[in-house]
Image: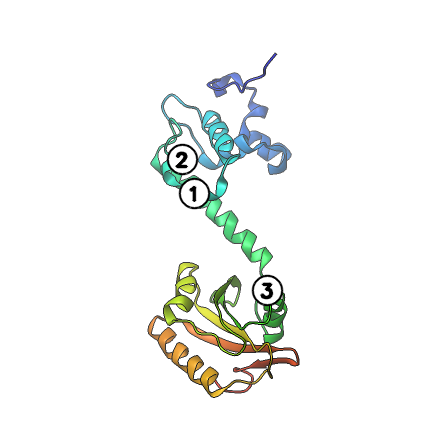
Amino acid sequence: MVYSKRLGRNLKELPKELLPREKLLKFGAERLDEAELWAVILGSGTKGFNVLDLGKKIASLLEGDLENLSLEKLLKIPGLGKVKAMTVLSVLELCNRYSKQREYPKIDSPKKVVEIVSPLIKGKKEHLFVLILSLNHKLLGVELVAIGGLNVVNASPREIFAPVLVKGGYFYILVHNHPDGEAKPSPEDIRFTRNIQEAGRLLGLELLDHIILAEEGYFSFRENRLID
């Protein structure tokens, strides 16, 4: 026998203690399956579709390609509607953001930056990274914006600021490495940093630091008062 999911059952047929909200109150959210959790989030069904039907369809859709989920795909679910589809997307986006907050720490020192970026540098070329921070210095993301040669790396303001703006950052930190040199800024590094800092301020973005990595250690522009 092939088992199939039974949809369309009237919720009034279910014992009260098996309704999603009542189950959550009695047993906790961990005892609900995905369809029941979505039913609690949606709150109600639509004409011809009870809320548990919709929850099952959403749960089934999310078993596929979650990364490419869109409003258009959700609207293909019969009976879901635009408002409930937007609710689903909003919940998933919040979960994604909270997950990233657990993954990435609060940046409170240059040493924390060094710990995060150092493992990302591969080979003997200069790499330029931008760390994207929230208003309270939570790390929202790390982006490699350019790879150069042994002693030079260049990136345009657009390449640097695009990921900061996309991720909704407020502060940002630049990091690049000196593969065969000291952790000390060159005149070009200083000039580049000041130009980027001024360009960022025009967009309402604040440069928190620029850190240079080398085998001997690191150099922080902020600690050495090269940026204000």
Badge nearest the viewer, 2 or 3: 3
Q: Is residue 227 visible?
A: no
Task: Please state if 191 lies on the left or on the right of 64 as rendered.
Answer: left
Q: Badges 2 and 1: C-beta atoms under 8 Å apart?
A: yes
- The foreground one among 228 and 46 is 228
Q: Is residue 78 visible?
A: yes
What is the image's colouring? rainbow
Numbered mark located on residue 74 in the image: 2
Residue count near mark 3 (Cα–Cα under 10 Å), binned few <14, some 14–19, many ≥20 = few
The residue sitting at 42% across, 71% down in the picture is 155
Label 2 secondary element: helix
Numbered mark located on residue 63 in the image: none
**Residue under pointer 3:** 120
Estimate the spatial distance between the alpha carbons at disc 2 and disc 3, rounded to whole Å. 36 Å
Estimate the spatial distance between the alpha carbons at disc 1 and disc 3, rounded to whole Å. 31 Å
* First of labels 2, 1 by sequence position: 2
Label 3 secondary element: helix
**Quadrant placement of the N terminus:** top right
* First of labels 2, 3 by sequence position: 2
Residue type, numbered disc 1: Leu
Q: Badges 1 and 3: C-beta atoms under 8 Å apart?
A: no
Look at the picture and state if 19 lies above or below 138. above
Residue count near mark 2 (Cα–Cα under 10 Å), binned few <14, some 14–19, many ≥20 = many
Residue type, numbered disc 3: Leu
